[in-house]
Image: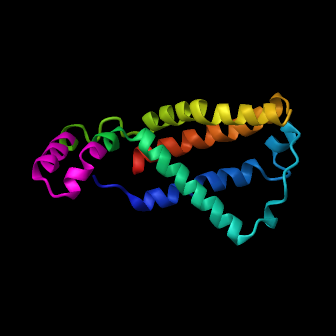
Amino acid sequence: MDLNYYAFFAIAFLPLIIGYFWYRPMGRIALWAGEVVQDLSSISVKQMLLLYLASLGLVYAYMNLIIHQLGFYELFFTDIMLGKDSANDIVADFLATYGSKHRHFGHGILHGAINAFLIALPLTLVQAILYNKGLRYFMFHFSYWLLTSVIVGGLISEFI
């Protein structure tokens, strides 16, 4: 299965870019939520690299949740790597028929939203409860993850 690795590495910058605008100290959203965020200019290069690596992990995980054809391909991956032609033929026939099914921006948006509600919502809700924060705190952080997941999901489905 051919993947667009240029798009993979480019899409991984999106959570950082959205986060830059979302979490900047004088941004409208931060002011509305009453959140005090640190000045982003104090982030070191090492921290930025760690954030980018985490973002790569996010895009890789989302890629496996959004592109359905990867699940089928992974069933036969070991056999393909061992050089079994029958497995390669099965995968080639399947991808020739269904390779582009559900590979559009709208489908990625749907799965991005589902991922946000099933993954980010519980995590941000637990964090808000444990830190004794209010609804605005929760909405501030969950809205970032919802927006990021929707955009990243759409781009993964369309371009990777």
122 in relation to 153, above or below: above
Residue at 67%, 36% (x, y): give it. Answer: 123
Q: Position of residue 110 (x, y in %)?
A: 49, 31
Name the side, left or right, on which 105 lies relative to 120. left
* Number of marks present in the image shown: 0
Residue 69 % position (x, y): 31, 41
x, y percentage for residue 155? 47, 46
Quadrant of the image occupied by residue 104: top left
Residue 78 vs 100, above or below: the answer is below
SS assignment for the magenta stretch, majority: helix
* Magenta-span inclusion, residue 153: no
**Residue 77 placement (x, y as % from top left):** 26, 50
The boundaries of the magenta stretch are: 73-94
In the rendered image, residue 79 lying in the magenta stretch gets the answer: yes
Which residue: 40% across, 51% down? 160
Work out whether residue 130 or residue 128 is closer to the camera in this orientation and state it: 130
Residue at the spot 19% in from the left edge and 38% down from the top edge: 97
